[in-house]
Amino acid sequence: MISTVQAGTAAYLQQVNSKEKKESAPVSEVKKMDKIESLKEQIKSGEYKIDTQKTAEAVAKDLI
């Protein structure tokens, strides 16, 4: 009886741990969305400044 309970508990813990791993994976996506929302707000408020040097370099590399 005790071994059955232990085996059941171990199986349950494995399921819980696998669910936690799956739920924690999209955290980077949430951070990306937060950054995008932050940039949108900066653009709307006029606080966002374009780095013209980096933009020009990126366009030049794309054209070459």
Image (spheres, helix red, strand yellow):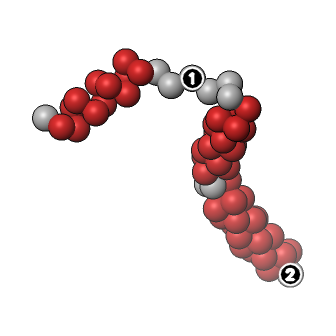
Crowd class of label 2 (few under 14; some 14 to 19; many from 20; radius 10 Å): few
User: Which dot, 2 or 1, sits closer to the camera?
Assistant: 1
Q: Quadrant of the N terminus?
A: bottom right
Task: Write down the residue under mark 1.
Answer: 49
Q: Quadrant of residue 39?
A: top right
Q: Secondary structure at mark 2?
A: loop
Left or right of 55 in this view: 18: right
Q: Position of residue 55 (x, y in %)?
A: 37, 27
User: How far is disc 2 from disc 1 in space, using C-alphas?
Assistant: 68 Å
Residue drawn at x 68%, y 25% is: 47
Residue drawn at x 70%, y 65% is: 19
Q: Position of residue 26 (x, y in %)?
A: 63, 55
Decide which of 5, 22 is in the foreground and name it.
22
Q: Quadrant of the C terminus?
A: top left
Left or right of 27 in this view: 1: right
| Above-or-below relation of 26 to 11 | above
Q: Quadrant of residue 56?
A: top left
Q: Position of residue 13 (x, y in %)?
A: 75, 65
Decide which of 32, 28 is in the foreground and name it.
32
| Above-or-below relation of 60 to 33 | above
Circle 2: residue type: Met
Which circle marks residue 1 in the picture?
Answer: 2
Left or right of 49 in this view: 17: right
Residue most toward the top? 53
Q: Secondary structure at mark 1?
A: loop
Q: Earlier in the sequence, mark 2 or mark 1?
A: 2
Q: Quadrant of residue 41?
A: top right
Asked whether residue 12 appears in the rendered view, the answer is yes
Residue drawn at x 46%, y 21% is: 51
